[in-house]
Image: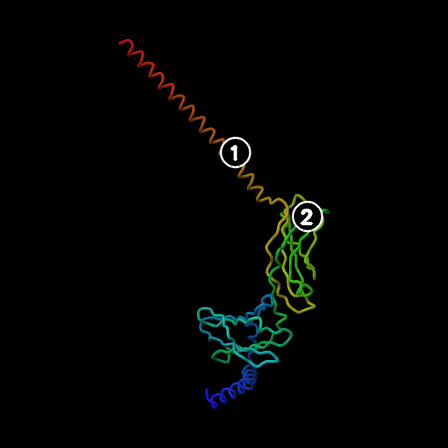
Amino acid sequence: MTMAGNCFLRVSTWLKQIYLPWLILLYNREVHAQLNDVSCIVHNEEFMECRWNHTDGEANYTLFYWYTSTSPEECRNYIQENGYNVGCYFSKDKIIEFENFYLYRNGSSDSGSLTKTFQLQNQVKLYPPTNVTLNMTENNELLLSWETPAKLLECRMYEIRHRSNKDKVWQVQVITAQTKYVLSSVDPTKFYTFQVRSKINQYCASTELWSEWSSAVHWGKDPIQSGKIHENYYLFAFLLALGLLIIVLSLLKFKRIYHSSHNQWKFLKVSNEKQ
């Protein structure tokens, strides 16, 4: 590239960094009603997806973003559906927390433009707790435990839900900075189910985004499985009795045929002797 070309590229980049923010501010004076159209979720502080809805007939939107300390740039990894941009993927190195994050979505008309501001520490959605286990203690209490990264423990809170086969609704408890929960007064005749989910607590961020529920863990005799076992036992007993009956009837029939054949043989023998 020539020296003139390099100079032109630098000037274009400089003008874009200055001009684009002012263009965005002027272009979006009357479009605040559309702010809820774009949502951003930081998945477990590992990557982020910002998405919006797209309907037939709408423009194919483009997305620009910047932080307070950076210049605007266009999304490099669009999420597409049916050939249309419906979101943008951000890798971990593009995520900055505790700093204003700005989005500008642009279409082919004024009605397709949008600006929005986030604080990304408030957009974190954690993964569900892992290695969830349930054990009975010596004090006849159920101990529920799970694992979480140690560096995030102080910033996490957990919601535990449990119920027995005789409960119609879930019992819910919320705890902070712990990875275990104890249920006292356990009824040995009941079948218990537990699940856990987590989110960033109020001391580290302001978010309502809970993780998905963990896989369910159980304690006690499952009445459904017990019923199936009884059903299988009765079915096996019935089939066994039916099989024995068939064998007995077959033996009786064979005995009848044998005696009939034996009598005929004796009759033929006697007839031959008389001749």
Location of residue 103 in the rendering, given as x and y in whole percent from the top left corner: 56, 77
Residue type for callout 2: Met
245 to the left or right of 171 = left
Q: Residue at label 1?
A: 237
Query: Above or below — where is 146 with respect to 53?
Result: above
Which color scheme does this rendered protein use?
rainbow
The circle on residue 176 is none
Name the residue at the right extreme.
Answer: 139
Along the line of sight, which residue is nearer the eye, 87 or 152?
152
Q: Residue at x 43, y 24 (%)?
A: 251
Q: Residue at label 2?
A: 136
For label 2, the crowd category at 10 Å Cα-Cα, with few meaning under 14, some 14 to 19 and many 20 or more, is some
Residue type for callout 1: Ala
Q: Quadrant of residue 98?
A: bottom right
Query: Above or below — where is 252 with respect to 74?
Result: above
Tag in front: 1 or 2: 2
Query: Above or below — where is 67 with respect to 242?
Result: below
